Amino acid sequence: MTLISLIVVLLAERIATQSKYWQESFYNQLYHGFLIRKNILSEDMSDATFLAVVIVPALILFLLLSSVDNGLIRLVLDTAILMVCIGCPHLRDLYKCYLQAANRGDFQACSMYADQIGHSGDTSSSFGQMLVWLNYQHYAAVIIWFAVLGPAGAVLYVMARSVNVQFQNEFSTESAIGQKIMFVLDWVPVRITALGLLLMGHFSRAIPTWLKYLSDAGASAKKVLTDVADAAEDIDVNEEDYTEEPCTFVRLAKRNVMFLVVVISVLSLSGWIR
């Protein structure tokens, strides 16, 4: 059922326009509003409270889905939940606007859209590497956690990511426990994703970088992914072409998602994943 849900969601996500009710941002905004009204989400909240805020929704979902015995209903529910969790239409629309601006030569607009997507000029990673990271957060990591723990796993990752971002936006500071949670949740998935990048790109160039971070337990997930992605692609940057570098990395990220689907297919056929 995992494979069927994944294929259906990826196809639907590409060919259909998602309304706000099929986007995790809609439900997270409601959840964050509730937390703020109840004074649960605060700058001095305890680590235990932060953990509860992240884990409780996924735990409740797991218990509810465990009570569903009908296979068809469970398949529909799993698919619907994954559809909500995966992707980010807002970021995808901004990226399309970036490409349109680049094609008409409006480089100032390109900078504006890149900034809205989350790439600032003072960051060490390129715009294309930032897109690989966002693809990981909104696709690869969600897919991996869905494959491991089902819908509850996807919700757990999305909630952790969303609450962490909301805390930073609300209080202009990072939560120490939030960073630790994301570090734990990203440690294995980011290395699996990085492995896919090197297999889909230049293997011989990227494998030393991947092996280096495999033994470096303390490296940040973003650093691991962007460095491996950079080694997996050979790009001659043209300062007058604002599309070549990001488009090359986006194609690499898309190939990696297909790689994950293939791996999950093999694991499903062999009985490792239901």
Image: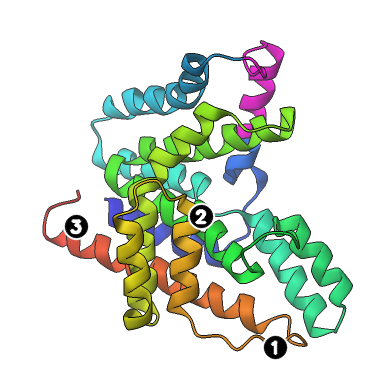
Span of residues in magenta: 28-44
Q: Nearer the viewer, residue 86 or 159?
A: 159
Asked if residue 261 is among those painted magenta in the image, a careful observer would answer no
Q: Is residue 242 shown above or below 257?
A: below
Q: CA distance from mark 2 to mark 3?
A: 29 Å
Between disc 2 and disc 3, the foreground one is: 2
Residue at screen point 59% across, 15% down: 45
Residue farthest toward the left in the current orientation of the protein: 270
The crowding category of the residue bearing disc 3, from other C-alpha atoms within 10 Å (few below 14, some 14 to 19, many at least 20), is some
Residue type, label 1: Asn
Q: Nearer the viewer, residue 88 or 73?
A: 88
Which residue bears the numbered disc 3?
268
Q: Which quadrant of the structure image shows residue 74?
A: top left
The mark found on residue 238 in the picture is 1
The crowding category of the residue bearing disc 2, from other C-alpha atoms within 10 Å (few below 14, some 14 to 19, many at least 20), is many
Q: Which quadrant of the structure image shows residue 38?
A: top right
Residue type, label 2: Lys
Residue at screen point 34% across, 53% down: 216
Q: Is residue 55 shown above or below 209?
A: above
Q: CA distance from mark 1 to mark 3?
A: 43 Å
Residue at screen point 65% across, 19% down: 34
Between disc 1 and disc 3, the foreground one is: 1
Total count of labels: 3
Find residue 113 and report its horizontal and vertical position in percent.
78, 63
Find residue 89 and report its horizontal and vertical position in percent.
64, 56
The mark found on residue 199 in the picture is none
Which residue bears the numbered disc 2?
222
Q: Nearer the viewer, residue 159 or 115?
A: 115
